[in-house]
Image (cartoon, rainbow, N blue to C red):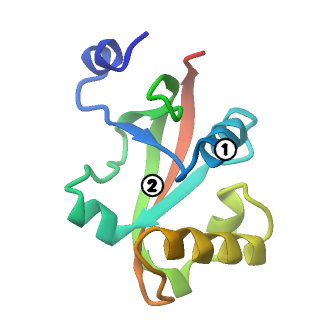
Amino acid sequence: MTLDELQKTYPGAVGFTLGDSRELNAELIALIRSGVKTATCGAARDFEEDDEDLPVEGRCDIALDWDGVPQLLVETVVVTRRRFCDVTEDFAVAEGEGTYDDWRRGHEAYFGRNGGFDPEMELICERFRVVEDLR
């Protein structure tokens, strides 16, 4: 099913791409498929600067692979806004990318590559559940 077809079935659904490379995107999609990754976050500035739709509790959205092909339909369960330095270990581990320290190192590097890192930066933190695997 295409993104357009899915958006007709799920009005308001937003297509989104995880990560900043083909490799990272594939890794994150695999972590979601396996049930290990049940949370994600992004810099609040990116949503504001790029006029991206914020995640909305109860809305279904579509995780895309690097080529824009729909992979997973996910429902947002909880959205919070918090500073990087205030992210809890529980949330970091729910991102499925290792320990809390692994999460901090990986996200400091990620945000550093994508607009700059500051421990006080605001994040949009989202917990989600998989509704359907679209493969």
Identity of the residue drawn at 73% across and 58% down: 97
Q: Residue 78 carries which label?
A: 2
Identity of the residue drawn at 31% across and 12% down: 5
Q: Quadrant of the C terminus?
A: top right
Identity of the residue drawn at 32% across and 48% down: 56
| Amino acid type, mark 2 | Val
In primary-sequence order, the first of circles 1 and 2 is 1
Q: Is residue 73 left or right of residue 4?
A: right
Q: Is residue 24 left or right of residue 115?
A: right
Q: In which quarter of the image is the N terminus?
A: top left
The correct choice, above or below, for 55 with respect to 133 in the image is below
Identity of the residue drawn at 47% across and 23% down: 69
Count of numbered marks: 2
Q: Residues within 10 Å of mark 1 (few under 14, many from 20)?
A: few
Q: Which mark is residue 103?
A: none
Q: Is residue 44 left or right of residue 67?
A: left
Q: Where is residue 82 in the image (x, y as percent from the top left)?
A: 43, 77
The correct choice, above or below, for 131 with respect to 5 in the image is below
- Identify the element where label 2 is drawn: strand
Q: Evaluate if marks 1 and 2 touch, with contact meaning CB atoms under 8 Å apart.
A: no
- What is the quadrant of residue 134 in the picture? top right
How far separated are the C-alphas under marks 1 and 2? Answer: 27 Å
- Identify the element where label 1 is drawn: helix
Identify the residue under disc 1. 23
| Amino acid type, mark 1 | Glu
Q: Nearer the viewer, residue 113 or 79?
A: 113
Q: In this view, does 108 lie to the left or right of 7?
A: right
Q: Where is residue 40 in the image (x, y as percent from the top left)?
A: 54, 56
The correct choice, above or below, for 49 with respect to 127 in the image is below
